Image (cartoon, helix red, strand yellow):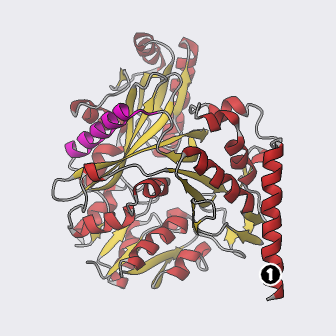
């Protein structure tokens, strides 16, 4: 097994990778910028190497600086986390050329899946269900209108190199198709340096459901069931759960088998995620494949008992997967709430500053038979910087049923203390209480439909007030006991 690995990332995902490496007896190397000199991932690692100024473009995504850190540390392998260089084919190729192991898929698989047009064509060839659409080049706005008419409105106009919701527009008529084509093209050019656009059918009553896959270098590929990621704001995920409350076993198996077929077609190894859009009749269509660890991977770990980071490291070292498809059962239900440094009462305006108070709920088994997990990269007294993603933590809960997992999440959110910055705890708490979410009757339009004027706060029913009061009393007792001690 590797003796030392470098984590080419920061924040909560760097901390997450370090935990698995430590459990495996592997030494870790952190990298850090000016803004992260005192960051948690720097404190947790066995050693840390400075890589430059605070902006990511001058530090975390500069391949030469990461390569220099690898050479200086003597690390044998690199885990990229997600974001930054995690899906950069040139980085993976540079590591390969230097004889350093990339803890991720082969660079050709990253290249194949990194382009939405190419990946959709490969998916079709592998027998994966895809959304009807036009994958060729589009000449101009009038050509876009012609194509949209052939597909049938509504259509989705997308940037080929897009991600994170950028370069996406929905058109319901010719005028919107013209406008959407040009605005998507402009945004794609500005965001990705690639203005290629494609058009596909817009799926009504859409749910975002993704399949976690894992492959080794011995030809074994399995799927670890699905995650429902339909609670999104502006195409950014806010709450995820596993499994999905919508899928039946037949659909789950069909999606899993198609996800594995696509992974096999591109020679995929390591952890990856195949994302699907699913309509109200459980018809599912391929969206894209993320050739990295996903932000929401903890919910899959909670229902399967598989440490995905550990398996990524073992696969990279050349080990075979220790389980087969029939071994991977769904055990209970898991929820994830993303805690962001943004103010929901001010249209989710980003917030920066010092965390004057940061007291997450206690991790581990709960008195009611559930589990609490909090993946984080911050600490009380630490700074929330303007330079990076505003996510502070991923609060996860597990329960034997969906309702139990929701109850565990409600309690955990009630006891989570954050002060000094604006944050979205009130918002995710309101979603957990919302009758429509509780029923599982959700689509990707949930937030837009239920909070059309933005978030103004939540009206608490008596049961919620009682639970909050109980949580406050428990926190007060704990605080009193600490003072007495």
Q: Nearer the viewer, residue 6 or 396?
A: 396
Magenta region, residue range? 247-265
Q: In which quarter of the image is residue 21?
A: bottom left
Question: Residue 263 in magenta?
Answer: yes
The C terminus sits in image quarter: bottom right
Looking at the image, is 405 positioned above or below residue 132? below
Q: Position of residue 96 (x, y in %)?
A: 24, 66
Q: Is residue 268 left or right of residue 57?
A: left
Q: In which quarter of the image is residue 425?
A: bottom right
- Note whether residue 341 is visible: no
Question: Residue 349 in magenta?
Answer: no
Q: In this view, does 97 lie to the left or right of 373?
A: left
**Residue at figure coordinates x 61%, y 31% from the top left:** 445
**Residue at figure coordinates x 28%, y 32% from the top left:** 128
**Residue at figure coordinates x 49%, y 36% from the top left:** 208
Q: Mark 1 points at which residue?
A: 481
- Note whether residue 398 is visible: yes
Looking at the image, is 390 positioned above or below residue 189? below
Single out the residue that lies furthest toward the bottom: 485
Q: Which of 480 and 268 is in front in this view?
A: 480
Q: In which quarter of the image is residue 187?
A: top right
Q: Where is residue 431 in the image (x, y as percent from the top left)?
A: 68, 42
Single out the residue that lies furthest toward the front: 368
């Amino acid at each position: 097994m590797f003796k030392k690995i470098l984590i080419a990332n920061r924040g909560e995902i760097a901390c997450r990778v370090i935990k698995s490496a430590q459990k495996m007896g592997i030494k870790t190397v952190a990298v850090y910028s000016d803004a992260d000199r005192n960051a948690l991932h720097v404190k947790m690692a066995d050693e840390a190497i400075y890589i430059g100024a605070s902006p990511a473009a001058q530090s975390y995504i500069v391949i030469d600086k990461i390569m220099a850190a690898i050479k200086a540390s003597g690390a044998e392998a690199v885990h990229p986390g997600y974001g930054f260089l995690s899906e950069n084919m040139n980085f993976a190729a540079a590591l390969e050329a230097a004889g350093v192991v990339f803890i991720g898929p082969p660079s050709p698989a990253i290249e194949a899946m990194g382009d939405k047009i190419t990946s959709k064509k490969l998916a079709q060839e592998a027998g994966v269900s895809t959304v009807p659409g036009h994958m060729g080049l589009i000449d101009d706005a009038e050509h876009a209108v012609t194509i949209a008419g052939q597909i049938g409105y509504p259509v989705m106009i997308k940037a080929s190199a897009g991600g994170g919701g950028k370069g996406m527009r929905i058109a319901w008529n010719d005028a919107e198709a013209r406008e959407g084509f040009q605005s998507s093209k402009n945004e794609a050019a500005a965001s990705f340096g690639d203005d290629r656009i494609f058009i596909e059918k817009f799926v009504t009553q859409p749910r975002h459901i993704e399949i976690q896959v894992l492959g080794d270098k011995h030809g074994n590929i399995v799927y670890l069931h699905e995650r429902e990621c339909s609670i999104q704001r502006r195409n950014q995920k806010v709450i995820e759960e596993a499994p999905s409350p919508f899928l039946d076993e037949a659909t789950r198996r069909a999606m899993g088998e198609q996800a594995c077929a696509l992974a096999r077609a591109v020679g995929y190894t390591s952890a990856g995620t195949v994302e699907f859009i699913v309509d109200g009749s459980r018809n599912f269509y391929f969206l894209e494949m993320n050739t990295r660890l996903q932000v929401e991977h903890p919910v899959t770990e909670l229902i399967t008992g598989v440490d995905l980071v550990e398996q990524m490291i073992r696969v990279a070292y050349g080990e075979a997967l220790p389980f087969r498809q029939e071994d991977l059962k769904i055990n209970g239900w898991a929820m994830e709430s993303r805690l962001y440094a943004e103010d929901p009462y001010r249209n989710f305006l980003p917030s920066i500053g010092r965390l004057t108070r940061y007291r997450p709920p206690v991790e581990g088994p709960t008195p009611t038979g559930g589990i609490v997990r909090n993946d984080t990269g911050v600490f009380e007294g630490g700074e929330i910087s303007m330079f990076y993603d505003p996510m502070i933590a991923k609060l996860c809960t597990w329960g034997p049923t969906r309702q139990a997992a929701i109850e565990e999440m409600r309690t955990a959110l009630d006891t989570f203390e954050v002060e000094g910055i604006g944050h979205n705890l009130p918002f995710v708490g309101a979603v957990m209480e919302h009758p429509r979410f509780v029923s599982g009757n959700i689509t990707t339009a949930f937030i837009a439909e239920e909070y059309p004027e933005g978030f103004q706060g939540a009206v608490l029913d008596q049961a919620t007030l009682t639970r909050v009061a109980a949580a406050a009393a428990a926190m007060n007792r704990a605080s009193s006991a600490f003072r007495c001690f």
